[in-house]
Structures are given as C-alpha cells and as structure tokens.
Amino acid sequence: MNTNQQWVALLTEDEDDFAYWQFGFTSWANHLQIEWFATGNAFFDRPGLAISPPAVLLLDGLIPSNDEPQWLRRILAHNCCQNLTVIMLSDQFTEDEYRQYTALGASAFVIKPASQLELEKAVLSVSQYAPINN
C-alpha cells in the first residue's frame, strides 16, 4: 500500500462491484487507489486510517441491508472522517433517501454505472473530489 497516494474507500458487500470500480479508477483516475471494504467494521479496522484517511468514501449496500444511514452517521462521527467526502451509491434514490442522506452529511449521490461509459463518467465525477496532488 502506497501511503503517499490518495485513496478511495469503497464500502460494498459485492466484490464484483469492487472489481468494476477498480477497473474504472485504473483506467480514468489512476492517481487514486481504490480499496474495498465489505463491512463498515473492516473500514474502521484498516491500519493507518487515522493517519491516512481516504480522500473519498463510496458507500453502497452494506450488511445488514438498509443500514446505510447508521453507517453514514458513524463514519462521519469518527475522528478521521469528520470532513470526509461521502458519496452514496445506488441503483436509484428516492426523494426521502436523498433528503435523509443529505441531512446526515452525504456529499453527493451517484447512480451505479451500468456501462463502461457510465463508469467513466462516475469515476471522473468521484475523482473531482480528490484532485491530483503535485
């Protein structure tokens, strides 16, 4: 792990989603390293989290299902993550979810990409929150 490189945390239970996003970041935002966490606890257990927090956190479905509000609240309350950019991922967002996640501190919302073009747009959108360090 390169501790000098900015990184993106992907919290999702789906390892295939990680492989898809990893391809995207390698292709269109290789200044960012993406790391996969299947659970919120795995994210908090990452060595060096307090010293080198992610530039962006992508929050997708976690086990147990529909527990994203509690995890969003917990993540943003953690000392390393209080000003963290958290982007919610979903196949769709209801107005209630949008309001709820915004009130809890979510920075942005991205519809999960279903094609390579959508993946490119999503990765470029996410990478805007972590500009290249010179």
Image: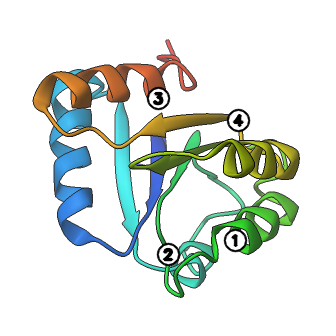
Tell me the residue that label 1 is attached to.
71
How many tags in the picture?
A: 4
Q: Crowdedness of circle 1 by 10 Å Cα count: few (<14), some, many (20+)?
A: some
Real-space Cα distance between discs 3 and 4?
11 Å
x and y percentages locating residue 53 in the rendered image:
64, 52
In terms of image quadrants, where is residue 51? bottom right
Q: Where residue 62 is drawn, which disc sits there?
A: 2
Is the residue under label 1 in contact with that under label 3 (CB below 8 Å)? no
**Residue type at numbered disc 2:** Leu
Real-space Cα distance between discs 4 and 1?
14 Å
Is the residue under label 1 in contact with that under label 4 (CB below 8 Å)? no
Element type at mark 2 = loop
Is the residue under label 4 in contact with that under label 3 (CB below 8 Å)? no
**Residue type at numbered disc 4:** Ser
Element type at mark 1 = helix
Is the residue under label 2 in contact with that under label 1 (CB below 8 Å)? yes
Q: Where residue 107 is drawn, which disc sits there?
A: 4
Residue 35 located left or right of residue 44: left
Real-space Cα distance between discs 1 and 2?
9 Å
Residue 119 located left or right of residue 47: left
**Residue type at numbered disc 3:** Val
Q: Crowdedness of circle 3 by 10 Å Cα count: few (<14), some, many (20+)?
A: many
The reply to whether residue 1 is visible in this rendering is no
Pick the residue in front: 32 or 37.
37
Q: Is residue 110 above or below residue 125?
A: below
Q: Where residue 126 is drawn, which disc sits there?
A: 3
Pick the residue in front: 75 or 30.
75
x and y percentages locating residue 11 in the rendered image:
47, 64
